[in-house]
Amino acid sequence: MKSLRLPPIWILNGFASFCLMLIQVLSGRALAPFLGTSVFTWTSVIGATLIGLTFGQAAGGALADRKSGRRALAQTFLMAGSAALAANFALAFFSARLSTYPMDLAFRSIMLAIVVFTPVAFFLSMVGPQLAKLAVDNLGHSGSIVGKLSAAGAIGSLLGVGLGGYVLISALGTQYLMSAVAIALLGLGVYIGVGERVLNYRIAGFLGVVVISNLLLPGLCKQESNYYCIRILAAGTEEAPRFTLKLDHLVHSYVSPRDPADLGYGYEQVYARLIATRYSKLDSFHAYFIGGGGFVLPRYLESYYPSATSTVSEIDPAVIEANHRFMELSTSTKIVMAPGDARRHLMRNVDEPYDLVFGDAFNDFGVPVHLTTLEFHQLLKSRMKPDGMYALNLIDDSSYGNFLTSMTRTLRQVWKYVEVAPLADTLEPGRNTIVLIASDEPLDKERWLATRPPSFDRLESDDKVIEASSKLLDPAIVEEFLSSHPNTPVLTDDYVPIDRYLAPVFRDAY
């Protein structure tokens, strides 16, 4: 069969670079359901890509000197496409195993990234040196030719990053997008290899079966957005459904839409106790929620405090949509939706001052650091009433305690009083959820202990949860714990070492 006309080498190099950067962006999103999103995940993704690029370019240069031509180029594109197909299978097979294997989180991240994505980067990086060898037929113009190839590669990389991050991942999802990249690379390899006897019928048939199998792999996400892999597990009965909302690898919320007093997590009972300590069911007040998730507490307020106003900043519009579509949140709800980042919402200053603020935007290991800093909390306080109260939950292990002590020190820079509610008599070792309550007015401890919020009515048989929600750490214990961590700083926009603080916590937990 006669060879087909070879596409311009600039386009080929741009397309290879486009696929390489697209897969790099995609790989961070693909690993998030298993490892979360943190500096470790993205460092691992970039590192795995650079490993593939380093060895791939060296191998591509050696191949170009020894075996330059269409046949070698076609084989390289076919191998890149095959590696992209294999990445989906490798992700499905290794992710659950490596994500829970007892090893350091950073090492676990880089190992999974290398196993899944380095082969794709390796073969795609082999393309550039081969194209340069094909293009340079006159050494007098070699500089301009290589420069044009590099420029085409840079343009392709920009398109890969832009289209991948802003359009393609949310439109197709990581699995189908990876399959689409693989099919495009395989198709290009077949086109270039026409007349070069690159494929036989057996190999072509095998690749066809693999492509179809790739497309039939079960999807992990109910919906995949620019921020999360959203998974919703249904339980309960038709009359009393209960949903579990998972954002990436964290169970974020347990939602009982027809029983809003079922708050799920213990820290939400602390929030319910705080609300009831301050307000009766008929009082009017304005609550602000940093993070929506399953909208558990806003649903609770809507049902039991009908005169209250709830404003929710949820960064991911897809999470809001998922609540409406799959978890029975009425589209006519009185909850005020504020899609987007909470810090930007507060900077716009469009609301009346808040009486209560609840922070629930920390997604397991993925902590949005700009919501932890001194500057953020100064901004938040400026949008609250003078007697307003701020409660947030965080995850830490008292065996380490660096995140907890840094957050406590940061809040103390802004508010006069900071209470620590560990859901236990003391700070117990192990990965635990801890609530911090900050205000310029002291918490009424007697009323706190005597309060029975509406959510307690369904907990008569679970006195442990009720008792745990009342626990406030003795100030002397708080001071002693802070003194045992003298080097943890106040968190600022310039210095937020939270990923480093939490790495051992999640290494031990997972």
Image: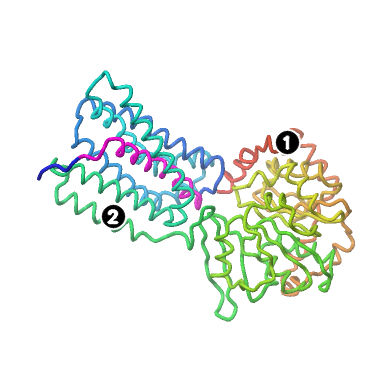
Q: 97 left or right of 487? A: left
Q: Residue at x 64, y 74 (%)?
A: 332
Observer-nearest of 91 and 195: 195
Q: Amino acid at mark 1?
A: Thr
43 relative position to 152: left or right: right
- Residue 327 in which image quadrant: bottom right
Q: Please tell me whether residue 337 belongs to the stretch shown in magenta.
A: no
Where is residue 405? Give x, y as percent.
Answer: 74, 42
Closer to the camera, 315 or 99?
Answer: 315
Residue 307, position as x, y percentages in the image:
79, 72
Question: Is residue 303 shown above or below 399?
Answer: below
Above or below, 317 against 259 in this view is above
- Residue 488 is marked as 1
Crowding near pointer 2: few (<14 within 10 Å), some, many (20+)? Answer: many
Mark pair 2, 1: CA separation: 51 Å
When the figure is inspected, residue 253 is found, relative to residue 484, above or below; the finding is below
> What residue is shown at x 51% (from left), y 50% (from top)?
32
Residue at the extreme bottom: 239
**What's the residue type where badge 2 is placed?**
Val
- Compared with 450, 486 (above or below) is above
Q: For the residue labelled by badge 2, is the local secondary structure a helix, a strand or a loop?
A: helix
Question: Bounds of the magenta span?
Answer: 6-34
**Along the line of sight, the residue nearer the viewer: 462 or 134:** 134
Q: Which residue is mark 2?
A: 211
